[in-house]
Structures are given as structure tokens and as C-alpha cells.
Image (cartoon, rainbow, N blue to C red):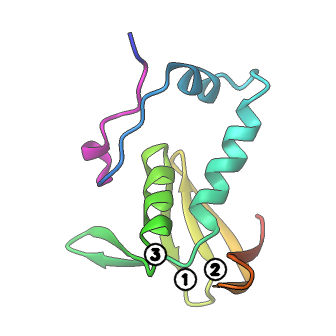
Amino acid sequence: MIARCQDAADKDVTNFNFEDEVFFRHMKDQRHANYQLIVDYLTHLSVCHTVVAESKDNKILYNASSPDELALVNAAKYFGYFFKGRDDDNNIEVDILGQTQVFQLLTVIEFSSDRKRMTVVVRTP
């Protein structure tokens, strides 16, 4: 039997599906060597982007300049790392497995064709 997360439709996640028995086993076992790596990776996916969250009809909708960024934020949401948006001070609010955490956004270095990457610098809670 393949272990999987709750259906994406139940989490308002579109265009994403993931099934990996080993990954889910490691993700749920806090004693496993990969557990903290998975937590860090999913936290980065939910924080390091330029996606804009908009509230409409009690739902949060994402707008992104890049479909890749949107896919990564949706992947994090699928696993319980829900990007809620930015507050008035531009802090990043993320619901991580039911607990809200706020990351102070220090700077964003936009993607460029020369660098072929973007950078987000935050202060962790």
C-alpha cells in the first residue's frame, strides 16, 4: 500500500500530486535522520518565494510571476506548510502543521538571467 498525504483537493491544492511511501514514513518519524532535513526543506519552500497571497471568499489564492514558484508553494501547502501571506511589515506568515510562524523578510534579490536564481533572506522566529 502506498502511503500518501491527504488528497490535494482536501487542502485546496491544485496541479499537484505526490506519492512516496518512504518520504511519508521519514516525514512522520521525528527520530529518523531525514526528518529535520524534510522539515527544513518544506519550510524553505513555504518561505523563499515572491508569491502573493490574496484572500477571496474566505480562501487564500496565490498569484505568482513564475509557475515554478507557484508549484513549489503549492507543494509545501500539500505537506502542511501553508503560506498565509505577508503582513503590513512584509513579514512572511506560514502555518506549519497547524502552528503559525512569522519570518522577518530582510531582502529579496530578484531572479536574473545572469545569476539564474533568486534569493530570499529571512530571519527565523
In the image, farthest residue toward the left = 57
Question: What's the amino acid at mark 1?
Answer: Asp
Q: Nearer the viewer, mark 3 or mark 1?
A: 3
Q: Which residue is mark 3?
A: 66
Q: Going 51% across and 48% down the picture, which residue do you hit?
A: 98
Q: Estimate the spatial distance between the alpha carbons at disc 3 and disc 1, rounded to whole Å.
A: 22 Å
Label number found at residue 87: 1
Question: What's the amino acid at mark 2?
Answer: Asn
Q: Going 30% across and 36% down the picture, which residue do you hit?
A: 7
> Does 93 sit left or right of 15 as displayed?
right
Q: Quadrant of residue 106?
A: bottom right
- The residue range painted magenta reads 3-14
Question: What's the amino acid at mark 3?
Answer: Ser
Q: Is residue 6 magenta?
A: yes
Q: Estimate the spatial distance between the alpha carbons at disc 2 and disc 1, rounded to whole Å.
A: 5 Å
Q: Going 68% across and 76% down the picture, which residue do you hit?
A: 116
Q: Secondary structure at mark 3?
A: loop
Residue placed most toward the observer, 118 or 1: 118
Q: Quadrant of residue 38?
A: top right
Q: Secondary structure at mark 1?
A: loop
Quarter of the figure that contains the N terminus: top left
> Does 114 sit left or right of 7 as displayed?
right
Q: Is residue 75 magenta?
A: no
- Circle 1 residues within 10 Å: few <14, some 14–19, many ≥20: few
Q: Which residue is mark 2?
A: 91
Image height of 68 relative to 63, above or below:
above
Q: Secondary structure at mark 2?
A: loop
Quarter of the figure that contains the C terminus: bottom right
